[in-house]
Image (tube, grey):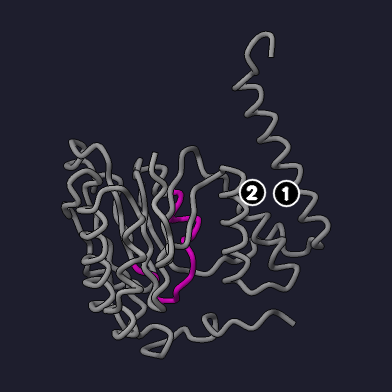
């Protein structure tokens, strides 16, 4: 018997897992999750505002929006908000061609099922050279993620499969896999909380 | 080439589906050992260390 995980049971249409809790999204606690994403307050503020925009737009649906921000200025320079395919954002490599002048790019997108970043998220971050990625979940969770080297799919697949074989839910398996890979410096992954302290150099 | 960011739950690849937890764990250990070996080869300790 697998660990129960209601997130996997709800797949269609509007339901309680995909609708956001507006009270929480507007709370100070949610706002503070963004305070330690970076040392750049403008970026953090911009990410928070963009997160709310995405979540309000996609609340109650299976669709994802994605925004790209300049790490140094915090300004949004690109977005995709019209995906009609559920649970993914698809774009060609050439999409970033006209933004090559922006040296450090940050992405933010939503996860309607509130799953942690997928391997596809890490893979895309690596291939596009993103400085940082943020996933905002419909249940109020916020993850930051990134890569410093080629993300190892074999390790990801085998680790996730091992956790699944031990009867953890898909959600917990993915989470434990990312935590383990982060601890081994194979990727960067963190759930942002309101109690995070920014590590100052 | 296409990029995609997605929220789709992990699915166990076909070639791993019938393996036991112990077999999967052994595979993970082997992969991690290989990565560590490559890291050491690429970053040898300084002379005299």
A93 above or below B40? Answer: below
Q: Is residue A2 left or right of residue A76?
A: right
Residue hosting label 2: A155
Q: Is residue A116 magenta?
A: yes
Q: Where is residue A88 drawn, in percent x and y? A: 37, 66
Q: Is residue A71 magenta?
A: no
For the point 49% across and 37% down, the residue is A149
Q: Nearer the viewer, residue A109 or A192?
A: A192
Q: Where is residue B21 drawn, in percent x and y? A: 80, 62
Identify the element where label 2 is drawn.
helix
Q: Where does the magenta region start and end? A: A110-123
Q: Residues within 10 Å of mark 2 (few under 14, many from 20)?
A: many
Are circles 1 and 2 on residues that touch, CB within 8 Å?
yes
Identify the element where label 1 is drawn.
helix
Q: Nearer the viewer, residue A195 or B31?
A: A195
Q: Quadrant of residue B47?
A: top right
Residue hosting label 1: B28
For the point 45% across and 51% down, the residue is A122
């Amino acid at each position: 018997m697998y660990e129960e995980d209601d997130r996997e049971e709800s797949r269609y249409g509007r339901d309680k897992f995909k609708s956001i809790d507006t009270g929480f999204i507007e709370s100070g606690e949610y706002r503070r999750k963004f305070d330690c994403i970076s040392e750049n307050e403008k970026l953090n503020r911009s990410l928070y505002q963009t997160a709310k925009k995405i979540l309000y737009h996609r609340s109650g649906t299976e669709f994802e929006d994605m925004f790209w921000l300049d790490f140094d200025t915090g300004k949004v320079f690109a977005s995709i908000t019209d995906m009609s395919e559920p649970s993914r954002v698809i774009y060609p490599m050439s999409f970033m061609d006209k933004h090559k002048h922006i040296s450090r790019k940050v992405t933010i997108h939503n996860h309607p099922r509130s799953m942690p970043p997928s391997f596809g998220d890490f893979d895309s971050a690596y291939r596009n050279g993103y400085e940082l990625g943020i996933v905002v979940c419909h249940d109020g969770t916020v993850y930051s993620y990134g890569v410093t080297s080629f993300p190892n799919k074999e390790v990801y697949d085998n680790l996730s499969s091992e956790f699944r074989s031990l009867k953890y839910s898909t959600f917990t398996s993915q989470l434990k896999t990312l935590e383990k890979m982060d601890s081994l410096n194979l990727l960067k992954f963190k759930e942002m909380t309101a109690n995070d302290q920014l590590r100052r150099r | 080439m296409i990029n995609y960011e997605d929220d789709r739950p992990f699915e166990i690849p076909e070639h791993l589906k019938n393996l036991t937890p112990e077999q999967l764990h052994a595979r993970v250990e082997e992969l991690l050992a290989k990565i560590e070996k490559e890291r050491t080869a690429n970053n040898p300790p300084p002379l005299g260390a």
